Image (cartoon, rainbow, N blue to C red):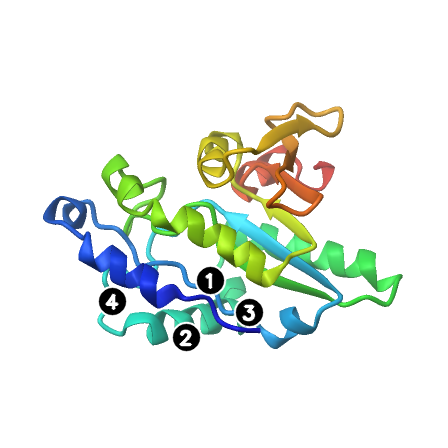
Amino acid sequence: MQPIDYQSVLTLLESTFTKQISCDSPTNLLCLKASENYIKADIKVMIFGQETNDWECQFPHIGGLPHLLNVYDNFFNNGKCFSYGGQFWNGFSKIQSRLRDEFSTESKSVGFIWNNVIKIGRCGEAGAPSKAVLDWQKITQNLIRKELERYKPDIVIFLSGPNYDKHIANIFNDVSFSKVSKRSDRQLAKVSSPQLPIKTIRTYHPGYLWRRGFYSF
């Protein structure tokens, strides 16, 4: 599997990095690295969170792309994220177990890759970054589409909540959200776009799901 050209994205981000943006303390770019388990899996799953709030602290990191790929590999592919704690990774782990159990009856392996709707967050702070940082990183919307083309997930799960639907719509301008159960489409929605697999859903961030009964979703 050929790597994504993250370097050209980083180069453009650095060339447009201003003092105003620096004052808003953007994190570093989330650069994906698929594991061998994902590459060889019968069923490939990409799970999106919202954004990072401390991804190697403030942009740009002196180690550049090699460092960011290694950080992703060590954090996610080597499982350090699950000792990191927090409701997101607890929820992610439960979804992994559920899907592996479900497909084990068909003797199919399941591989996972982690992504975020917003690729550059705020250093040390939760929540979406400023408008200036969002505008600066618009190039990453096309990057996400390229990641989907390259990694070809069979299932996509957005654990981003309905308030991030506007950010998903910025990535896929033809996207639609529809009700799939007795729950409202704010709680659980099918996400449709020619650029997404048929099996794509969006639900709340696990922090909300744990409070509302995780397994009922």
**What kind of residue is marked 2?**
Asn
In primary-sequence order, the first of circles 4 and 3 is 3
In this picture, is 52 found above or below 84?
above
Q: Which amino acid does label 3 sit on?
A: Ala
Residue 58 seen from this side: no
Q: Residues within 10 Å of mark 2 (few under 14, many from 20)?
A: some
Q: Distance between the residues labelled 1 and 4?
A: 21 Å
**What's the CA distance linking mark 1 and mark 3?**
20 Å
Mark 1 or 4, closer to the camera = 4
Quadrant (top left/top right/bottom left/bottom right) for the N terminus: bottom right
Residue 13 figure quarter: bottom left
| SS state under label 1 | helix
Q: Which of marks 1 and 2 is in front?
A: 2
- Residue bearing mark 3: 34
Q: Distance between the residues labelled 4 and 3?
A: 21 Å
* Residue 91 drawn above or below residue 183: below
112 and 137: which is toward the camera: 137
Mark 2 or mark 4: name the one nearer the start of the chain.
4
* Residue depicted at 36% across the width and 69% down the height: 68
Neighbourhood count class around disc 1 (C-alpha, 10 Å): few under 14, some 14–19, many 20 upward? few
- Mark 4 = which residue? 61
Q: Is mark 4 on a helix, strand or loop?
A: loop
In front: label 2 or label 3:
3
Query: Is residue 168 placed above or below 179 in the rendered structure?
Result: below
Q: In which image quadrant can residue 101 be found? A: bottom right
Task: Indicate the quadrant containing the C terminus: top left, top right, bottom left or bottom right.
Answer: top right
- In the image, residue 130 lies at what x, y percent? 26, 38
Residue hosting label 2: 70
Of the residues under marks 1 and 2, which one precedes in the sequence?
2
Kind of residue indicated by mark 4: His
| Residue 205 spot, x, y in % from top left | 53, 41
Q: Name the residue under label 1.
A: 84
